[in-house]
């Protein structure tokens, strides 16, 4: 892992804008993935390059790069980098080694479907080209990863356009965790309507849940939205109820890590609670989901595996001292599943799915299939 | 502020039990209030004494002592200490100075009704005795403060007995913030059924919301319950929804800072959200309220003043580095109001109030009046 740029806030240009950098990019000259190390935000904008497979795995696992789409892009270039030194192998050995590398990268995090989805696309690209030899397969993989990145930018822009049809200028919008530019190649998913609205002068008031335990809302979302000049207010997760009760929130926008065929949606821990609150207060709750996160193979949320992380993230991480007694039991699920019944609509790049989702999501996937033809 | 005892966890007796110390006590020899400095928990159990008025005000304001009942006890002894040097004054000057001291102490925190309630009781005790002179008034104030403390212990025990009638052995119980022994003289309010249940071998599984931003659930509740050998699990506030969905919670118990005449209840920020979730999942939501927190003079929750605290508590307090971008707006209400309609019952020492609260709370206060006669 090499550090490319180092800028401690306050020590260099205070106008440093996190949006000036790509969340994830591929450095063609160095043949390496370049990411913003998100574990250091908002205190330091540090760009790092990832080249070896353990570096890439570690960056995904420890959330240096996070957010379902950004994980997908990183994994895609990661598998390309894994394939590069395998070019000299015979075809079957190449494919076997690729399969192994795919298994390794996909083990970095279990919940986000994009990780598996991107790796699957990469493998298919290799297999389509393999009749022309392993070198052709590797080139095809490079191009597929680059396409996944470019697609993400186009998709997020379209998510923003579609999401914008659901809101009015001046609205108060609540979001949870970071489904922002820092989770994607550009625009974000849940934040895409906010960025596009800002371009059009919509004057939104955006409220960001800080999102314990890893504080993605405070460290990332509040950071990137305020960097973009959007009126942004930070709150602790447990303040959302009184905020909604006060009438300041007209809509909730969240991202997602996986949408099951029935519309049940896995997203960052705490999303379910926000959805229940929104239902109680009659506030529309929108999930912004690139179609790549729709997983028709998973019938309901019950079948989505939920990553359990270390209690240390709750008891001591970030803190100057321990904040819980030594030896205390702590639960730390990274995600929860929001029941389809709590979701007003699921915004995809192919349109807005409404209940019943078992039908509307299939239609979205059909549209997607037709768009590919 | 003098330090009486210092015990950094890990540096001295590791069996150090926070419950071995009184949350708040009066040192007759030194004529000083002795408290556990709760801002240092769970890393250090430090007893400090408070003597001057600014020391007492600061300890309440910065939450060295917190929890409505413990604040009331501290303020009561605080007003006695204010009165001590005033003994030589003529009666009217004594009463005027006392009035001023009362105003000063009551300004430390605005939401908890116990602060004003305890100071009012102290003033009444002084006025009842003032015909016998200022020295007699000061003695009466001493005895009144001691009685407020002893009453708190009796009341909390009775809250526990009454709360215990609402639960069954083996239940999973969720609590928010610290309405524990550390918020009272003994037993706590919301925790009283847990402690009494533990005495009777009920085998509860207690889940503690960490309670951002000041982490009273992690630092205090998880600490005191696990110290007492109760099976305790810590969670981030935003995990309560998935915990309830999993079926592990059979009842919620929370404390309160003020109950309005219609049953609306102010308690630590986040309580409202827990109540909405409990309603959604069909889980009974109990407020445990000493009758001193019932304020029939406040018609509804809309009239309860909500303390706004510094954004620093969200953005940087406790942390090794800032966790939110510099200059970000942050809301930080210390409390929220849970609508009466979300509350299954309000447990007092004079019985369990059920909806409609406008009637049942009046009956509780009538019972209280009769008990005093």
Image: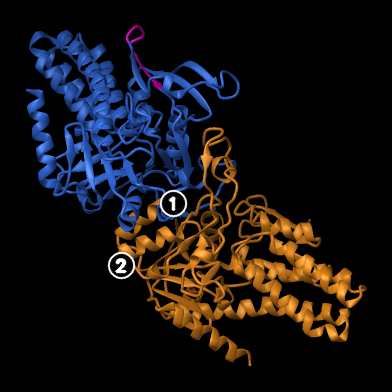
Chain colours: A blue, B orange
* Left or right of A187 on screen, residue A296: left
Side of A28 where A89 appears, left or right: left
- The image shows residue B44 at horizontal and vertical percentages of 65, 53
State which quadrant residue B182 falls in. bottom right
For mark 2, name the chain.
Answer: B
Magenta span: A28-35
Outermost residue toward the top in this view: A29
Chain letter belonging to callout 1: A
Is residue A94 depicted above or below B48 in this figure?
above
Residue B10 at x, y = what percent? Answer: 63, 50
User: Image quarter for residue A277?
Assistant: bottom left
Look at the picture and state if A303 lies above or below B200: above
If the image is split into quadrants, where does the N terminus of chain B sit? bottom right
Q: Which residue sits at x=32%, y=41%?
A: A254
Category of crowding for the residue at label 2, using alpha-carbon neighbours closer than 10 angstroms: few (below 14), some (14–19), many (at least 20): few
Tell me the tag on residue B191: none
In the rendered structure, does residue A29 fall within the stretch colored magenta?
yes
Q: Is residue B358 visible?
A: yes
- Residue B48 in the image, given as x and y percentages of width and height: 74, 59
Find numbered disc 1 in the image and state the secondary structure of the residue it sits on. helix
Residue B282, disc: 2
> Depth check: A366 or B230 in front?
A366
Relative height, residue B252 to residue A71 (above, below): below
Count of numbered circles in the view: 2
Q: Is residue A371 magenta?
A: no
The residue that label 1 is drawn on is A243
């Amino acid at each position: 892992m090499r550090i490319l740029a180092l800028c401690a806030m306050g020590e260099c240009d205070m106008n440093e804008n996190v949006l000036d950098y790509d969340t994830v990019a591929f450095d063609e000259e160095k043949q390496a993935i370049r990411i913003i190390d998100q574990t250091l935000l908002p205190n330091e904008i540090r760009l790092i390059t990832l080249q070896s497979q353990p570096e890439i795995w570690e960056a995904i696992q420890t959330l240096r790069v996070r957010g379902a789409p950004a994980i997908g892009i990183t994994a895609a270039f990661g598998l390309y980098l894994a394939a590069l030194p395998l070019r000299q192998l015979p075809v079957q050995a190449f494919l076997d080694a690729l399969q192994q590398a795919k298994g390794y990268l996909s083990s970095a995090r279990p919940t986000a479907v994009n990780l598996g989805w991107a790796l699957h696309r990469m493998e298919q690209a290799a297999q389509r080209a393999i009749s022309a030899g392993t070198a052709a397969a590797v080139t095809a993989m490079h191009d597929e990863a680059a396409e996944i990145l470019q697609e993400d930018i186009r998709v997020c822009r379209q998510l923003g356009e579609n999401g914008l049809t659901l809101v009015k200028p001046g609205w108060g919008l609540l979001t949870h965790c970071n489904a922002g530019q820092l989770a994607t190649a550009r625009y974000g998913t849940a934040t895409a309507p906010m960025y596009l609205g800002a371009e059009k002068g919509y004057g939104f008031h955006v409220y960001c849940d800080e999102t314990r335990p890893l504080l993605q809302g405070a460290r990332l979302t509040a950071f990137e939205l305020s960097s973009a000049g959007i009126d942004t207010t930070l709150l602790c997760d447990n303040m959302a109820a009184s905020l909604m009760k006060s009438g300041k929130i007209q809509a909730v926008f969240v991202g997602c890590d996986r949408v099951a065929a029935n519309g049940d949606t896995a997203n960052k821990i705490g999303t379910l609670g926000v959805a229940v609150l929104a239902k109680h207060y009659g506030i529309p709750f929108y999930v912004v989901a690139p179609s790549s996160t729709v997983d028709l193979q998973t019938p309901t949320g019950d079948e989505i595996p939920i990553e359990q992380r270390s209690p240390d993230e709750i008891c001591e991480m970030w803190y100057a001292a321990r904040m819980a007694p030594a030896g205390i039991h702590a639960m730390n699920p990274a995600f929860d599943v929001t029941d389809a019944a709590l979701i007003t609509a699921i915004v995809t790049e192919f349109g807005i799915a409404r209940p019943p989702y078992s039908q509307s999501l299939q239609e979205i996937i059909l549209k997607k299939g037709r768009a590919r033809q």
